[in-house]
Amino acid sequence: MRDLMDRVAVVTGAATGMGRSIALSLAEEGVDIVISDIDEDIAQTTAEEVRALGRRSIAVTTDVAQLASVKALADRSFLEFGKVDILVNNAGVNLRPFRAVWDVSEEDFRWVVGVNLMGVFNGVSAFVPRMREQPGEKHIVNTSSMGTLVTVPGNSAYAASKTAVTGFSEVIREELEPDNFGVTVLFPGYVKTRVGTSERLRPENERSEGRNITPFSELAAKRKGPDYQQSESIAGAVELKDGADMIKGIEPDLVGPMVVKAIRRNAPYCMTHPTPAEALRRHAEALIASYVVD
Ligand SMILES: NC(=O)c1ccc[n+]([C@@H]2O[C@H](COP(=O)([O-])OP(=O)(O)OC[C@H]3O[C@@H](n4cnc5c(N)ncnc54)[C@H](O)[C@@H]3O)[C@@H](O)[C@H]2O)c1
């Protein structure tokens, strides 16, 4: 989508962090923005920031984990703006503290998958039928994570949800291409946002408090192999050998302009940090070599 002037974008999780940066960067290119977030007050502030850039903007309180809430967001967006050209499914959460799989409860898993994966499906399901009927180019951005490209112990629920976002997005990119859609998967490395405090947004009935969780340092200490080092900054232990760049924290404001470029180029992927090429190569080679018949 080369020409962004007078387009309409819906960005979920747009009140703060990368979503806010994407919303403001699109507004700077002439796009009107629907700020969708579960955090109503901050969403209003971000919508005001967009209006200060001279574009139309409304804030819509949404829980992306609930299809009915996302359908209401779609209805409101089409009612107010008459069209939606760009959909950014960005809202996401993560568990804190990081925990080994035996400490991940059903509530933990459902919450993370509900927001990170179902949230993306709900966005596509609620918006795409009407977007398909619109003439001209359309674009969808779905937020995955570089944390799915290297091993981040203690992060299994998150990795499950975000890896699924990538697979889902790759399939719909092919399916929607004939209808003039582009699809981009956003792979953030470590970006200095409030994602580490997302437990604050967790619904009461999906909490699993009062459990003993193995301190992550214990889990990390048991790990073997020269590729792994301690890193308190992200999860305690990350495959640092070629994933080191992705744990260098960057400011969220840098991400919006990257996403704008990816939309303009219809790039299938958008990395916020240097790609962990060795880890990807090892992964691909292991898969290619894995068919053993004798
Ligand atoms: N920050 C990182 O290092 C990092 C790395 C990889 C991927 N990500 C992903 O990037 C995306 C943006 O996160 P961020 O880092 O900017 O964090 P953030 O917490 O600053 O922003 C996330 C936004 O999503 C909103 N949100 C949470 N649950 C919601 C729900 N159920 N419905 C609607 N909105 C909801 C929050 O209120 C918040 O405004 C997320 O999908 C996150 O998982 C972040």
Image (cartoon, rainbow, N blue to C red):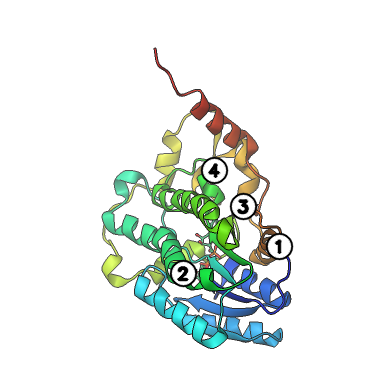
Label 1 crowd bin: few (<14), some (14–19), many (20+), radius 10 Å: some
The amino acid on which the numbered mark 4 sits, given as a three-letter code, is: Leu
Q: Secondary structure at mark 1?
A: helix
Query: Which one is closest to the eye, mark 4 or mark 1?
Result: 1
Q: What residue occupies the far top of the structure in this picture? A: 294
Residue, disc 3: 268
Q: Are marks 4 and 1 in contact (CB under 8 Å)?
A: no
Instruction: Tell me how far mark 4 sits from mark 2, CA to CA.
Output: 31 Å
Q: Secondary structure at mark 3?
A: loop
Instruction: Tell me how far mark 1 sits from mark 2, CA to CA.
Output: 23 Å
Task: State left or right for residue 67 relative to residue 29.
Answer: left
- Compare marks 4 and 1 and give the one earlier in the sequence: 4
Instruction: Tell me how far mark 3 sits from mark 1, CA to CA.
Output: 11 Å
Quadrant location of the C terminus? top left
Query: Which one is closest to the eye, mark 1 or mark 2?
Result: 2
The image position of residue 96, as x and y in percent, is 42, 58
Residue nearest the observer in this picture, 278 or 229? 278
Instruction: Tell me how far mark 2 sits from mark 3, CA to CA.
Output: 21 Å
Residue, disc 4: 149
Residue, disc 2: 129
- Compare marks 4 and 3 and give the one earlier in the sequence: 4
Label 2 crowd bin: few (<14), some (14–19), many (20+), radius 10 Å: few
Quadrant location of the N terminus? bottom right
In the displayed structure, 110 sits above or below 85; it is above
Q: Are marks 4 and 3 in contact (CB under 8 Å)?
A: no
Query: Which one is closest to the eye, mark 4 or mark 2?
Result: 2
Task: State left or right for residue 50 relative to residue 168.
Answer: right
The image position of residue 9, as x and y in percent, is 59, 74
- Compare marks 1 and 2 and give the one earlier in the sequence: 2
Instruction: Tell me how far mark 4 sits from mark 1, CA to CA.
Output: 25 Å
Query: Is disc 4's CB within 8 Å of ligand 1?
Result: no
The amino acid on which the numbered mark 3 sits, given as a three-letter code, is: Pro
